[in-house]
Image (spheres, rainbow, N blue to C red):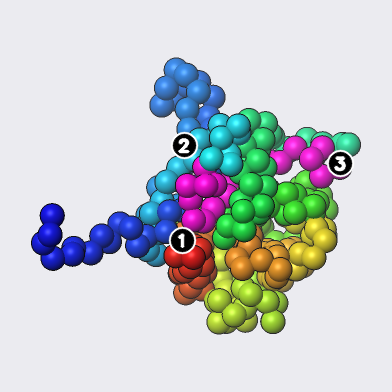
């Protein structure tokens, strides 16, 4: 009790909430189940965070935000309902997961209100853009002439295309390089950003690959998957997010 103080290393780790995916009955369980690719968590742990998963209990979104120091909105093989950004028509390729999106909008809005560091990844970047008042391209091949293969045919632990980082942005200061090689697993992308939001990365075909809110300490969305740690900039991005979350935890 009065012995030498032992460092509590767990207390030093910022708690990072990661949104889960939802699957219908079948496969893992005969009842609906949650899912999350493991490297979302292992990359956060390796960067110094304490990863925890956030279930789709929308009424508890504020309670969750009160317990975490940073929020990662993850990706998934589904789309934000176009009605949420004012599109009345829905492209044939669009699939939705209303329960997941309802929760992700709720937890993202709560995190924005609380001033929590937020990192949106792939579909999470698209969700973040919609939460910030922006719109989405519903299907890149039908909207962008001569678009790159943003659903890359090669494995997703390899790069799919390069991106150019926009000079002067937070992202540029974090990744410390004007160009990255990133994976690409999306058929949608940011169309228009919300008020005050800045584009921080683009693919060579012009598709927006990242956004940020310069008015917030850390509010960044990227269309690629930094958790695969393919480019040196990926690790720097995760490290900066964890550092911002740790600063928040210590304040
Ligand atoms: Mn891409």
221 or 2, nearer to the observer: 2
Q: Is residue 184 visible?
A: no
Q: Decide: few, some or many residues near mark 3? Use Cα within 10 Å; few <14, some 14-19, many ≥20.
A: few
Nearer the viewer's eye, disc 3 or disc 1? 1
Magenta includes 69?
A: yes
153 and 9: which is toward the camera: 9
Whichever of labels 3 and 1 marks the residue nearer the N terminus, that label is 3
Residue behind label 1 places its C-beta within 8 angstroms of ligand 1: no
**Mark 2 vs ligand 1: CB under 8 Å?**
no
* Residue located beneath label 3 in the image: 87
Q: Secondary structure at mark 3?
A: loop
Residue drawn at 50 percent across, 23 percent down: 32
Residue density around tag 2, few if under 14, some if 14–19, many if 20 or more, within 10 Å = some
For the point 55% across and 76% down, the residue is 175
Give the side of residue 77 with respect to residue 7, left or right: right
User: Dot 2 corresponds to which residue?
Assistant: 35
For the residue labelled by badge 2, is the local secondary structure a helix, a strand or a loop? strand
Q: Quadrant of residue 161?
A: bottom right
Q: Tag 2 or tag 1, which sits nearer the N-term? A: 2
Q: Position of residue 227 (x, y in %)?
A: 47, 59
Circle 1 residue: 249
User: Residue 241 at what x, y percent from top left?
Assistant: 51, 65
């Amino acid at each position: 009790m009065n012995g030498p103080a032992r460092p509590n290393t767990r207390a030093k780790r910022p708690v990072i909430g990661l949104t889960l995916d939802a699957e219908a009955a079948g496969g893992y369980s005969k009842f609906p189940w949650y899912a999350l690719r493991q490297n979302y968590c292992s990359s956060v742990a390796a960067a110094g965070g304490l990863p925890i998963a956030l279930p789709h209990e929308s009424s508890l979104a504020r309670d969750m935000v009160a317990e975490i120091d940073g929020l990662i909105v993850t990706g998934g093989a589904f789309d934000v309902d176009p009605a949420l950004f004012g599109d009345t028509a829905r492209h044939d390729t669009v699939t939705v997961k209303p329960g997941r999106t309802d929760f992700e909008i709720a937890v993202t809005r709560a995190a924005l209100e609380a001033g929590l560091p937020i990192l949106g990844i792939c579909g999470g970047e698209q969700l973040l853009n919609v939460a910030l008042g922006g719109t989405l391209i519903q299907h890149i091949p039908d909207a962008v002439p001569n678009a790159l293969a943003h659903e890359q045919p090669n494995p997703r632990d390899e790069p799919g295309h390069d991106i150019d980082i926009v000079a002067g942005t937070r992202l540029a200061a974090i990744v410390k390089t004007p160009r990255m090689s990133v994976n690409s697993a999306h058929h949608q992308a940011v169309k228009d950003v919300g008020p005050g939001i800045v584009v921080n990365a683009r693919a060579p075909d012009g598709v927006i690959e990242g956004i940020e809110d310069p008015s917030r300490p850390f509010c960044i969305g990227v269309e690629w998957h930094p958790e695969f740690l393919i480019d040196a900039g990926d690790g720097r991005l995760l490290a900066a997010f964890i550092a911002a979350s740790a600063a928040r935890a210590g304040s």
